[in-house]
Image: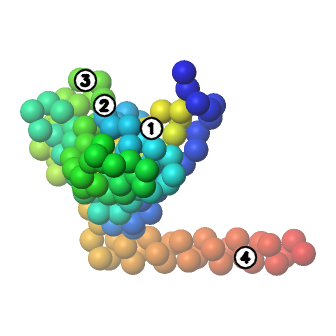
Amino acid sequence: MPHQQGIKTVAQNRKAYHDYFVEEKYECGIALFGTEVKSIRQGKVNLKESWAQIRKGEVWVEGMHISPYEQGNIYNRDPLRAKKLLLHRSEIRKLDGLVMRQGFTLIPLEMYLKDGRVKVQLGLCKGKQLHDKRDSMAKKDSEREIQRALRQRQK
C-alpha cells in the first residue's frame, strides 16, 4: 500500500541544468534496499556528482550518495554503490543508441516520492561549453531584471 498521495521532491540536481542542456526527461524507478528508502524519506540523498550509464541492457546510476540510515545497523549498504534504474526495455534501447552515437549523457535530475514510491527523473543531456554557460547566465539575469521591472511598475 502506498503511504501517501501526490509527489514530494526529496533531492534536485540544480548543477546539471548549469552544466548540461537537458533534451528529454524520463521518469524511472530505482531498485533500493529498505534502509536506503528510509534514509531517502528523511531527505539524506545527494545527486550532485551522479550520472547514469547503460551496462548489459540495464541502466545503472553511479555517484549518487544515500547516507546510511541512523537506526539501521548491519543492513546499511555502501552509500555510493551503483543502483539499478527501472525503465522499459524499449526506452533503454533508445537511450543506448542516443548515448553511443550522438554523445548524450544520462544525468539524474531529481529524486522524489510519488504515491509512496521512490522515483528518479533521468535527463538525456548534452554538455555545455563555457560560452553556453555564459549565455544562459546572461539570459537568466535579463529575465530576472525584466520581472523586477514589471513588479516595480505594478506597484
Q: Tell me the residue that label 3 is attached to.
A: 90
Crowding around mark 1 (Cα neighbors within 10 Å: few <14, some 14 to 19, many 20+) is: many
> Which residue of the protein is positioned furthest toward the right in this rendering?
155
Q: Nearer the viewer, residue 43 or 30?
A: 43
Q: Tell me the residue that label 1 is attached to.
A: 118
Q: Which mark is residue 108?
A: none
| Residue drawn at the location 58% of the way across and 39% of the way down | 7
Choose the circle earlier in sequence order: 1 or 3. 3
Verify CB contact (< 8 Å) between mark 4 and mark 1.
no
Choose the circle earlier in sequence order: 2 or 4. 2
Query: Vertical placement of 132 versus 104: above or below?
Result: below
Tag in front: 3 or 4:
3
| Residue type beneath disc 2 | Leu
- How much space separates mark 3 and mark 4, taking CA atoms? 45 Å
Q: Tell me the residue that label 2 is attached to.
A: 86
Q: Which mark is residue 148?
A: 4
